[in-house]
């Protein structure tokens, strides 16, 4: 068994036995009743309180007393057959699930405040109006002379010569490069 944090001392058998002494003397009342509707109902109940942190209901395929089956996407497979099914022991599924839940006091928030909604442009315009700030458009901004414009460079030096590498083109992931040469030599 592994213990962490404040309980790390319990890995010692004597410390563990001393820890259990007051627990053995306590009057324990155990109230157990069967789950409502079986494992599926329990999983559905828990999923409503997870705020979609670990896994969505649509990915759960099958559950029984011993295993949980769910779909997952294999990003290494570049073909159309990316969706796969994984079946785990219930205890392993719960262990992996709990890795993705947040501790007490933490909240998972993706968007917050005036930039949260689809009305963010309206909200920002209203804030600028209240603050008395005018928005700058691209025509209002001073355009630098062509001589003043410095080419974009990478922070890392060229691995061959140690010189500065200039950014010749930027393109999105998966998009082919429009330049004819695939090797760019820095000078």
Image: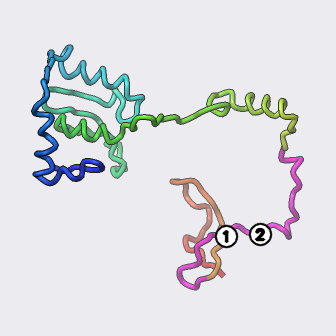
In this rendered view, identify the residue nearer to me: 85 or 29.
29
Residue 128 is drawn in which quadrant? Answer: top right
Magenta-drawn stretch, dominant element (helix, strand or loop) = loop
In this rendered view, identify the residue nearer to me: 170 or 182.
170
In this rendered view, identify the residue nearer to me: 124 or 145.
124
Residue labelled with disc 2: 150
Q: Residue at x 47, y 34 (%)?
A: 107
**Residue 171 point in image, percent of width and height:** 60, 57
Q: Residue at x 62, y 71 (%)?
A: 155
User: Which label is found at residue 92?
Assistant: none
Mark 1: few/some/many CA within 10 Å (<14, 14-19, 20+):
few
Q: Residue at x 83, y 30 (%)?
A: 130
Report the magenta residues as a range. 137-162
Residue 44 is drawn in which quadrant? Answer: top left
Residue 123 is drawn in which quadrant? Answer: top right
Scheme of colours in the image:
rainbow
In this rendered view, identify the residue nearer to me: 61 or 100.
100
Helix, strand or loop for disc 2:
loop
Residue labelled with disc 1: 153
Which quadrant: the C terminus?
bottom right
144 falls in the magenta region: yes
Q: Residue at x 18, y 17 (%)?
A: 35
**Residue 139 point in image, percent of width and height:** 88, 47
Helix, strand or loop for disc 1:
strand
């Amino acid at each position: 068994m592994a213990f962490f944090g404040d309980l790390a001392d319990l890995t010692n058998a004597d410390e563990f036995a001393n820890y259990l002494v007051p627990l053995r003397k306590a009057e324990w009342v155990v109230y157990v009743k069967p789950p409502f509707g079986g494992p599926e109902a329990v999983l559905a109940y828990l999923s409503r309180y997870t705020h979609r942190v670990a896994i969505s209901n649509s990915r759960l395929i099958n559950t029984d007393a011993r295993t949980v089956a769910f779909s997952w996407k294999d990003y290494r497979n570049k073909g159309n057959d990316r969706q796969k099914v994984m079946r785990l022991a219930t205890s392993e599924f719960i262990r992996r699930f709990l890795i993705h839940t947040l501790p007490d006091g933490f909240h998972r928030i993706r968007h917050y405040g005036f930039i949260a909604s689809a009305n963010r442009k309206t909200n920002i315009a209203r804030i600028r109006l209240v603050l008395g700030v005018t928005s700058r458009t691209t025509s209002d901004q001073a355009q630098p002379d062509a001589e003043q414009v410095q080419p974009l460079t990478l922070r890392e030096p060229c691995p061959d010569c140690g010189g500065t590498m200039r950014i010749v083109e930027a393109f999105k992931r998966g998009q082919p490069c429009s330049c004819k040469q695939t090797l760019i030599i820095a000078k």
